[in-house]
Image (cartoon, rainbow, N blue to C red):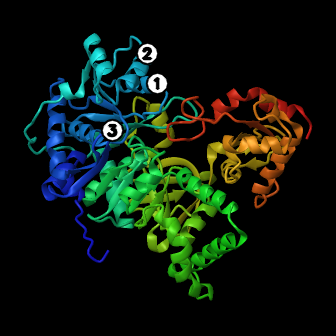
Amino acid sequence: MSQWSEDLISIEHALTLDGLFFQRVRRSPERVAYRFHDRDLGWQQLTWGAMGQAVARWRAALAGEALATGDRVAMLLRNCPEWVMFDLAALSLGLVTVPLYTDDRADNAAYILQDAGVKVLLVQDAGRWKRLAEALGPAPWPLRVVLLDGGAQALDLAAADPRVRVAEDWLPDTAAAPPPRAGDTRALATIVYTSGTTGRPKGVMLSHRNLLSDAHASITVIACYQEDVFLSFLPLSHALERTGGYYLPMMAGACVAFARSVGQLAEDLLTVRPTVIIAVPRVFERVYARVADQLATRAAPVRWLFRLSVAAGWRNFLHTQGRGGWHPLLLLWPWLRRRVAGPVLDRLGGRLRAAVSGGAPLPYPVARTFLSLGLPLLQGYGLTETSPVITVNPIEDNIPESVGVPIRGVQLRIGADDELLVRGHSVMMGYWNNHSATAQVLTHDGWLHTGDQARRSGRHVYITGRLKDILVLSNGEKVPPADMEMAIAMDPLFEQALVLGEGRSHLTALLVLNEDLWNGLAQEFGLDPAAPNSLEDPHLGRDMVKRVRLALRDFPGYAKIRRAALTLEPWTVENGLLTPTLKVKRSEVLKRYRESIERMYSVES
């Protein structure tokens, strides 16, 4: 770290996102910009200079499509250098980019293409385009479809449909570097469609200034250096990854390595050895659960030593943060760090100086364990509508129960019903083609209603609930289900959980069981794991309720689950029960399990 250097590009020098890129190419042409894995060649890398040449080719190809300033173009790609090339090429022509999730349902992606009037679409492969084309039917948009991956099927589609081109044929072999552009920093840069947990997604309009100001302000809380290596595995269509894992590293001149897949993440961590990762809580929860499962099979002395390491590490964390005094366990920490904590962190590459969690609440036990082991795990908070970062914990003032401190230029205030309101340069321009929705969340003087309840203590912000997620029981008791669901899901047996009770006399829960643990559990109760009615066994049900109550033992009396319905079917994007950002579509789950829910409430508890 003593030899690490900063080379930040200011918003004034960049003006636009494409301006940021061209400034970086000019400053650091020989430095490595991106690393990626090629199936035939293994890990490869591209310098900023090489990226500049590549973006010029994509820009020339887009320029040949007779597009006008402000026209929308979209990408349906996994994380790769071409995602970045297409985005920057489009922005440099004054176009507006619309990112799509590769694992989203075809009908949802089709809706977005039509709502945004997308004229050019870059798609990963022929298979994805065929599924999307079927959902689109005779709809007019897009006018041009470019398939990134070639092959016989792609060539056949291109021959049969005049809209379709294969990228290698569409791109020119070379192209001259574009002249500098006097872009408008306040112009619309992208439309990012929100998850749509309660209906059709809304298109969040973000300007160049929105995204640049958010990236730059985030760097003022967590420093970023040219020598940093980011491992990118959250989809670039996710606002957090786009700002924090794409524009921010570009602003600092850091390198980004694109992970191959979530399934290969453990191996990529060891190969890339990143210094920074950005993830949603589920990633850290899974690592935490894996460590817990492995510990359960180890001898008692090993389990005792791990618990001692966590206790000593937590004392060390509080001491270094200035929130805890000296304790005898601090004497043991250097040895425990080498023997116990070190090997765990080595599985994450051994070089992480910052791991940022956002997109959903991070369970406190997970945060505490990783912080105790020496991982600088930082919880943040934000919305797509705020580009997205609003708050994040600084490394030197990290309170894991909080979502951190406001980034520079962000104003916060607590409104009616403890709702958090936000104002600043990163707040969106509004919702695309939806003035009524914009008026519901944006005041005339620029305050954005987040819909989240919060409190402030000193510099730090604490999210305490969500206005729309409150369950009101028939007796008037108000119950926030999100924290309860998170606590239940900490039990490895429960993959997913949904707490129910709106308008009812008591609470119940829908529980998705861990399929890997189901066979053993069924045998324990003398049940046939292959028989669907085994999940309805009353003895099993009562035991599951006991486990849930144990998970909720630290909650107040209102958090008492009376009955539970069990399923082995996971809630996924593919079956329409999760959004692309992995948030549960509550209304869809309630529809799917309507009969099970009614059965729970038809029996007196």
> Which callout, 2 or 3, points at the residue further toward the start of the chain?
2
The residue carrying mark 1 is: 106
3D distance between C-alphas at marks 2 and 3 = 26 Å
User: Would you say residue 415 is visible in this rendering?
Assistant: no
How packed mark 2 is, by other alpha carbons closer than 10 Å (few <14, some 14-19, many 20 or more), is: few
Q: Residue at x 54, y 69 (%)?
A: 371
Q: Give how far across and how far down residue 8 sits, in percent.
A: 24, 63
Q: Using residue 403 as the reference point, say whether residue 537 is left or right of it.
A: right
The residue carrying mark 3 is: 190
Cβ–Cβ under 8 Å for marks 2 and 3: no
Q: Amino acid at mark 1?
A: Ala
Q: Amino acid at mark 3?
A: Thr
Residue at the far right: name it: 604
3D distance between C-alphas at marks 1 and 2 = 8 Å
Q: Using residue 31 as the reference point, say whether residue 289 is left or right of it.
A: right
Mark nearer the viewer, 3 or 1: 1
The residue carrying mark 2 is: 134
